[in-house]
């Protein structure tokens, strides 16, 4: 996700887009979607673009990841 600040003084395009890292493992370890949403909102506090759709999509992806890992654990080891 790139959060672009409002147009400042003329600079190169690369300087205008701050990098943002979201630790998905950290989010997976959290108890609830509300806690996850609060953490992502905190990380995006300086982003002036709308973040609700991004957060909603990210939480959907995390729920899908949790379902996959739960299903794999319940299947047990795969035969070789």
Image: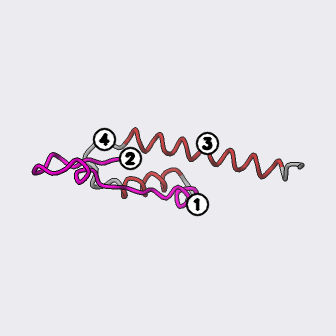
Within-10-Å neighbours for mark 4: few <14, some 14–19, many 20+ = few
Taking the image as shown, residue 38 lies to the left or right of residue 68, namely left
Q: Which residue is mark 1?
A: 29
What span is colored magenta in the figure?
Answer: 1-28
Which is closer to the viewer, label 2 or label 4?
2
- First in residue order: circle 3 vs circle 1: 1
Which residue: 48% across, 56% down?
35
- Label 4 and label 3: CA atoms lie apart by 23 Å
Which secondary structure lies at badge 1? Answer: helix
Which is closer to the viewer, label 1 or label 2?
2
- Magenta segment, prevailing SS (helix, strand or loop): loop
Q: Which residue is mark 4?
A: 50
Q: Position of residue 24 (x, y in %)?
A: 52, 55
Q: Quick one: which residue is furthest to the left in this view?
A: 9
Within-10-Å neighbours for mark 3: few <14, some 14–19, many 20+ = few
Which residue: 25% across, 47% down?
4
Which residue: 51% across, 45% down?
59
Within-10-Å neighbours for mark 2: few <14, some 14–19, many 20+ = few
The colour style of the image is secondary structure
- First in residue order: circle 3 vs circle 2: 2
Q: Which residue is mark 3?
A: 64
Specify the label residue 1 is tagged with: 2
Q: Position of residue 73 (x, y in %)?
A: 77, 52
Specify the label residue 14 is tagged with: none
Q: Position of residue 36 (x, y in %)?
A: 48, 54
């Amino acid at each position: 996700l790139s959060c672009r600040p409002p147009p400042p003084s003329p600079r190169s395009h690369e300087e205008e887009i701050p990098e943002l890292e979201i630790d998905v493992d950290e989010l997976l370890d959290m108890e609830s979607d509300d806690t996850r949403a609060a953490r992502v909102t905190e990380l995006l506090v300086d982003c002036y673009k709308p973040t609700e759709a991004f957060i909603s999509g990210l939480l959907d992806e995390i729920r899908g990841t949790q379902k996959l890992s739960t299903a794999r654990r319940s299947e047990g080891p795969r035969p070789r």
